[in-house]
Amino acid sequence: MARIENQDIITKIISKKNHFPIKDEKGLSDYQKLPDKTGIRIQEVGITRFRIPVLFEHIELPERPIMNHDCIASMRINLKEGKTGINMSRLCAILQEETSNIPLDHILIEKILKRFQWEMRDEENEEPFEYTHLILEFNYPMKQKSLKSGNWGWQYYPSKIESVMNKNQMDLFYTVDYEYSSTCPCSLSLAQQYEYEYAQGLTQEGNGIATAHAQRSRARVTVQIAPEEEFFIPYLVELLRKAIPTETQSMVKRIDEQAFAILNGMNPIFVEHVARRLHQILDNESKILDWKAEIEHFESLHSHNAFAKIYKGIKGGLK
C-alpha cells in the first residue's frame, strides 16, 4: 500500500502536463489539498519545537509585572480520512497573532484552540476539527528569599502548559519540575550511630565525624486544573515548597548554608516519603482536579537513581 501511494505521489509531482488540479491564490500547486484515498485518519498531526516568545503576568509578585519568556510550542490537530494534510504554517501564524500582545491565560488558550478548530479548515463548508492540542514548554522564574541572610535570587522552574480541546470541552494541565535536596534517613542514622560509638570509645575508625549522603533531587508534578482558574504555576510551586521544604537555593551566604544543613537534618527523606507528602498536599487542594508526580533522587552514594511515581488514581485520570 505504501509503495503504491508513494508512486502515485511521484507521478502527480513530476507530471509535465502542467495541469496540477489544485493551486493556491498565487497559482502555485497546493498538494496538501488533494484528497487522500487511503481512508485512514490520523489522531494528531502538526508541529513540534516551534520557538516563540510568550507574555506571562507574574501574579505572585505584588506589582504583577508582565514578562516575556522563551517558549517551545507544539501544536496538533486531528486529521479525518479523506484529507492528505494540513497547512502547518497556519498553526504558527495563529499562535503568533494571539500571543504577540496579550499575557497568556486560560481565555487566550481557549481562543487559540478554537481558532485551530475553525481556521485550519481548507474550505468554509468543512466541519471544524474536533480535536486541537497546544503545549508550551518554558522556564518560569520566581523570586526566592534566602533562608536567613535577607538576600533573594531568581529560581527557574522548568514548566509545561498542556491544553486540549475535544469538540467544545477544554482540559488544562500544568507541569512543574521542582528541585530539592534529599538527605537519606538511613545514611543519617548510620552517621549518628557512628559518631555516638566513636564518642563512647567503641570504635577508633575515622575521626569521629560522619556525613550523611544527600543529593539534588527532582519532583515532576502534573496537575489538572479547571480552565477558569487563574494561572496556576506560582500556586503549584508554593504547594511543592510546603510539601518539600528543602528546595535548592538560588542565593546563599554562609548563614544560609548553615540553615540549609539544619533544614536537611530536620527533613531526611526517601523518595517514598516525598511521594506521600505530595499525595497529602495535592489531594487536599480543592482547585486540583487530578494530579500525578514522578520523583527521582540522583543518588550521591549509588551510581543509580531512586525513583517513585504516584497519582490521584481516579478513573480515566492521569497515570
Image: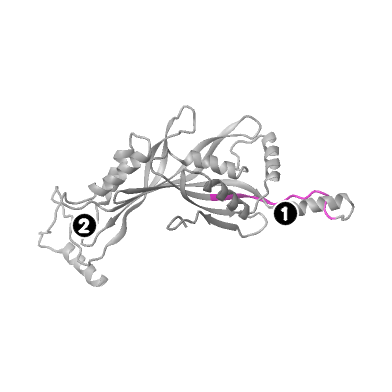
Q: Is residue 16 left or right of residue 47?
A: left
**Kind of residue at badge 1:** Ser
Left or right relative to 22: residue 229: right
Q: Which residues are magenta?
A: 205-219
**In the image, is residue 9 part of the stretch drawn in magenta?**
no
Counting from the top left corner in percent of width and height, residue 310 is at 54, 55
Nearest the viewer among 3 and 232 is 232
Q: Where is residue 250 drawn, in percent x and y?
A: 58, 38
Q: Residues within 10 Å of mark 1 (few under 14, many from 20)?
A: some
The one of 143 and 62 positioned closer to us in this rendering: 62
> Which residue does the numbered mark 1 point to in the structure image?
187
Q: Secondary structure at mark 1?
A: helix
Q: Is residue 207 visible?
A: no
Q: Secondary structure at mark 2?
A: helix
Three-letter amino acid code at the position of disc 2: Gln
Residue at (48%, 43%) from the top-left corner?
A: 286
Residue hosting label 2: 32
